[in-house]
Amino acid sequence: MENIQTYLQQAVDKNASDLFIIAGRAVSMKTEGEIVPIGGERLMPEEAEKLVRELYGLARRPIDRYLSVGDDDFSLSVQSLARFRVNAYRQRGSMAAVIRVVSFGIPNWQEKDIPPEVMKIAGMTRGMVLVTGPAGGGKSTTLACVVDAVNQNRNAHIITIEDPIEYLHRNQKSVISQRELSMDTSSYVTALRASLRQAPDVILLGEMRDLDTIQTAMTAAETGHLVISTLHTVGAVNTIDRIIDVFPPAQQQQIRIQLAQVLKTVISQQLLHTTSGGLVPAFEIMHLNNAVRTLVRDSRIHQIDSVIQTSAAEGMISMDESILRLYKAGRITQETALRHAMNPEQLQRKLGGR
């Protein structure tokens, strides 16, 4: 068995997105969406523990929390190699970890197939923007590109609150304060409340996990700041429903009114396998125009999809239209298109039943 640095090096060399340390199987990595073994023998529990402890050593992070709670998130850097985001956990009584590979540099948004309409977020000065999608769907990359665009073009104070920090930003035109949960602050809501006293222009909130965080984020957006955050939802309708459902029924109408005022844009994205063996993002883009605001206030959220479909001139696009364009461009197969569609039956008809 190799040491953890050797496996990290192999993951970077093979352009892997993730590395898996799990007892009962060989050390494995995910490349182009496929998990493949890179170690010879299956790991014994004590070997998995050795590798996990080596990760903590590289990060110079106490292992106490992990031993007491059973899971932990943190990041680490290996000089001249890459940054890594680590989720350590226990499974079947043994130590395990999944390690996300993050390059030192900020990705180029054009090379990552991020549409110019998404990058317009960087020009906004107030309100709330949500970037949503499943885990591993590319949200962190999109957010890093947006923050970098603000940093290059605006004189602003950007505060990021992350768990953990993935991409390191250097001050350019902006001043950037990057805070990491556990290391720099105890919780999202604590850091978010404190940030309002730190003269922020842009606040990047890694995730809106609970009622208090969502309420504080909405208040921050109301008071003249640009708040950008994420949710693990796909589609604008599901995203708005998720936010409203967090609150007690007696509060939901007031939240609808508040959300209609502060929410500016919802971006949803998924990563799809391409015909060439890579990954490409599909995006849904919804801006809150007067029609959408009215639907949110009046609890007719299910009608938002119709507005998106008829508002291409305003920069909106539905997830299924984005997927259809990728299919017509020959970048994805019909099977992939239908698997990721929000309405597979309707998309099938557009594909001509082929």
Image (spheres, helix red, strand yellow):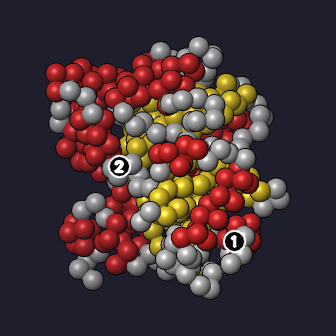
Dot 1 crowding, Cα within 10 Å, few <14, some 14–19, many 20+:
many
Q: Which amino acid does label 2 sit on?
A: Thr
Q: In which quarter of the image is residue 41?
A: bottom right
Vertical side of 293 occupied by 336: above or below = below
The C terminus lies in quadrant: bottom left
**Pointer 2 with pointer 1, Cβ within 8 A:** no
Dot 2 crowding, Cα within 10 Å, few <14, some 14–19, many 20+:
some
The residue sitting at 68% across, 78% down in the picture is 1
Between the C-alphas of marks 2 and 1, the distance is 32 Å
The residue sitting at 44% across, 75% down in the picture is 332
Q: Can residue 170 be seen in this view?
A: yes
Vertical side of 226 occupied by 240: above or below = below
The residue sitting at 31% across, 22% down in the picture is 258
Q: What residue type is labelled 1?
A: Tyr
The residue sitting at 77% across, 39% down in the picture is 170
Vertical side of 114 occupied by 120: above or below = above
Residue 46: x and y in percent read: 58, 69
Q: What element carries label 2?
A: loop
Q: Quadrant of residue 298?
A: top left
Disc sitting over residue 233 in the figure:
2
Q: Mark 1 points at which residue?
A: 7
Vertical side of 297 occupied by 138: above or below = below
Residue 95: x and y in percent read: 53, 61
